[in-house]
Amino acid sequence: MLDIQTDVRNEFSSLLKEIKIPEYDGRETQTQKYGCINQFIYDNIPTSLYRYRTTEEHNIQALKKSCLPVTKPCNMGDIFDSLIAIDSDRVASTINRELGAINIDAMAKTLFNGGAIPHDSLKLLDPKTQALIQANRHRLKSDISLKPMLKAAFDNVKKCTMQQVPYLKNATVNTLQNIRFIACFCEDVSLVDMWSDYAGKHTGYALEYNFKEQELLCPNKHSNCKNMQMKHILFPVIYNDSYDATDYALYIMQNNIMSMHSNNTMQIRFFDWLFYIKGYAYKAERYRRESEWRLLTQMEKSDTHYLGLKPYDSMPLSPSAIYFGAKMKNDTFETLNQIAAELGLKRYRMVDDSLTRTVVPVPILS
């Protein structure tokens, strides 16, 4: 196995840059590409991953039911930072090219010959120009000002479209924050900062998971995982400056333009299905100490409108051990220790280690 903290993340980053799964790929090709990612992840999942928890009631109830709480990124306790970057200049040049392809000359020629502009094309024009063309269509056949008028109208369309560019980043981040559920894990159970930030300043607990023993990721853990479907995917976070989401921004903008053009009623095919993994994979370098892995879950087909999804959910997933915080209250410890014993979990108490200035787990003997 590669060194988890460095090599795995670097190689996973290279893999995501190398592989794209556009919508036009055939099913067999898509399966092969997904398989490369699945197998790499499965081969390099750490033996144990840990999830730090507070002692809030919904966490305790989930533990009783051996369920894993998951949430939309927009509801996470810390700022969800997917480090989205969009190349505005590239978006601008593409928009200019797409609008130029509408061919103003051809539209003017249609009018000169007494034809009518299809309604879908008229929608590209501002209301004032639409009304002028509709009211004076026959006179415009001989009006030499028609072409400049159309050019001015389409220049205005480009201007209005470009004004949307600054909002594309927010739209992209908003999409990522709402269309998936997510759960976060760590490679180390002895990180003081994690206990402070995510486990109630050491009053909470941490749960240990062995994902290679879970059917969640690979239905048959003894079989090759290349063909498993990616309803759930666990992956290492990449600590890097940014993720370039320009292709997604262009997808949004081009579809908006094409949907208004009479000769292009079909939507552009999606550029890369892995966008819905890549967009969650990046996080700021300052968080590297967390050694984070993320479990990403897809919404059910019935939940096609992501804004209608409830903000929290849970999924069946059993931990293998529990670690009680060094400052957990005695009554809380008694309650959780009883639950953990009934579930058959290994149990540990975290204690301060003055020599290493950290906390270390001490087994609780039954």
Image (tube, grey):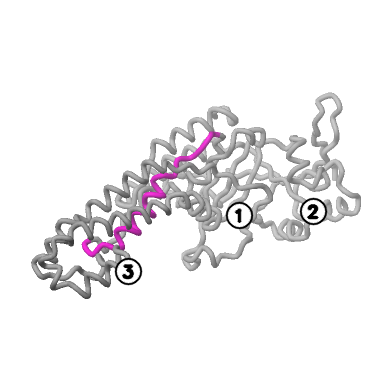
Residue 224 in sight in this render: no
Question: Residue at label 3?
Answer: 127
Residue 48 x %, y %: 65, 39
Image spot of residue 308 (x, y percent): 54, 67
In the image, the segment drawn in magenta is: 240-263
Dot placed on the residue nearer the N-terminal end, 3 or 1:
1
Q: Disc 2 marks which residue?
A: 55
Depicted 208 relative to depicted 113: above or below: above
Point out the frontmost of discs 3 and 1.
3
Q: Identify the mark nearer the N-term, 2 or 1.
A: 2
Q: Nearer the viewer, mark 3 or mark 2?
A: 3
- Where is residue 115 shown, x and y percent of the image? 12, 70
Q: Determine the CA span between mark 3 and mark 2.
A: 58 Å
Q: Quadrant of the N terminus?
A: top right
> Magenta includes 250?
yes
Which residue has dot 1 on it? 74
Residue 227 in view here: yes
Residue nearest the observer in this picture, 257 or 109: 109
In the displayed structure image, the side of residue 56 where residue 227 appears, left or right: left
Camera-side residue of 257 and 104: 104
Taking 259 as reference, is 104 left or right? left
Q: Label 3 sits on what residue type?
A: Pro
Q: Amino acid at mark 2?
A: Thr
| Residue type beneath disc 1 | Cys
Observer-side mark, 2 or 1, equals: 1
Q: Secondary structure at mark 2?
A: loop
